[in-house]
Amino acid sequence: MDSTDFNDVLPNWQQAGTALLPKSDLYASSDGAFSLRTVDYGGKHFLRVKNQLKWLRDYSGQGTYTNDPGNENSYESSHMWTVRSSAGTGWRNAVDPQAGSCVKYGDVIWLQSNYADYQWLTGGRLGGNHAVLTRNFFQDGATKQPHFEWIIQSNHTINSTSIPDPRSSSCVRLGERFYLRNVVPESETTKRWLSSLDYWTQYSNDVWSNLFTSDISSNAQSLHSYKWSFEAHELG
């Protein structure tokens, strides 16, 4: 028996110590198992920080932060993000050119807010290239494109676009932990990783956030604050 054998069974939590239940007893096939679902381009997902009740939120189409949506009255769409292969048209419901294809480690992805049209997650902004915001790519222009592009990585020690991810042939699955690297600016390509801080900082007069793009190797934050996972929007 190896680890793959557990893809076809479920623990019988009602009678601990008894045999495992085949998924075929509960599903039409094992393909429906949550652990086997891939993150596909065009899919809408929640983005969560490892081991914390903190999900990425777009606030009013400008600022971003992480919080527990259960503790506030907010629209579900403000915590939902569409994974894209490019900027697309700007419309939230537009079909992605690679719709149906899985996201693989090492891919460059765009994260579009579902709170408002024409808003994408962007990093390395403002002074010090630390701010994480949502912006309209078409208004910012092509010179700002690297701020909108995120490399999804299985390993935080990879800090060059010329080095392939060790899992580059593998699809990203729901619930798997990964890192998001923002290659901004060009002179500091190794130093911008998305992280959720334990404190809040003021980006401008009206924008506060607990998100940063910062260097993993020099930051005092726990490594866990840089680990993210996609969670399903709909399980059906």
Image: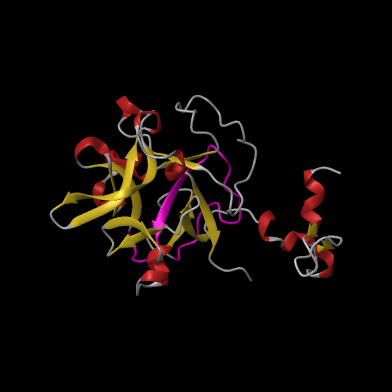
As for residue 101 lying within the magenta part, the answer is yes
Q: Residue furthest left?
A: 205
Which of 58 and 211 lies nearest the eye of the viewer?
211
In percent of width and height, residue 115 lies at 36, 66
| Whether residue 88 is visible | no
Quadrant into which the N terminus falls: top right
- Measured along the vertical axis of the image, is residue 91 above or below residue 175? below
Which of 227 and 143 lies nearest the eye of the viewer?
227
Which of 31 and 4 lies nearest the eye of the viewer?
4
| Whether residue 146 is visible | yes
Looking at the picture, the colour scheme in use is secondary structure
- Measured along the vertical axis of the image, is residue 194 above or below residue 12? above
Q: Is residue 109 left or right of residue 10?
A: left
Q: In this view, does 78 lie to the left or right of 161?
A: left
In percent of width and height, residue 214 lies at 33, 36
Q: Residue at the location (79% across, 46% down)?
A: 4
The region drawn magenta spans: 93-118
Quadrant into which the C terminus falls: bottom right
Q: Residue at the location (52% across, 40% down)?
A: 107
In percent of width and height, residue 177 lies at 55, 46
Number of marks drawn: 0
* Magenta stretch, overall SS: loop
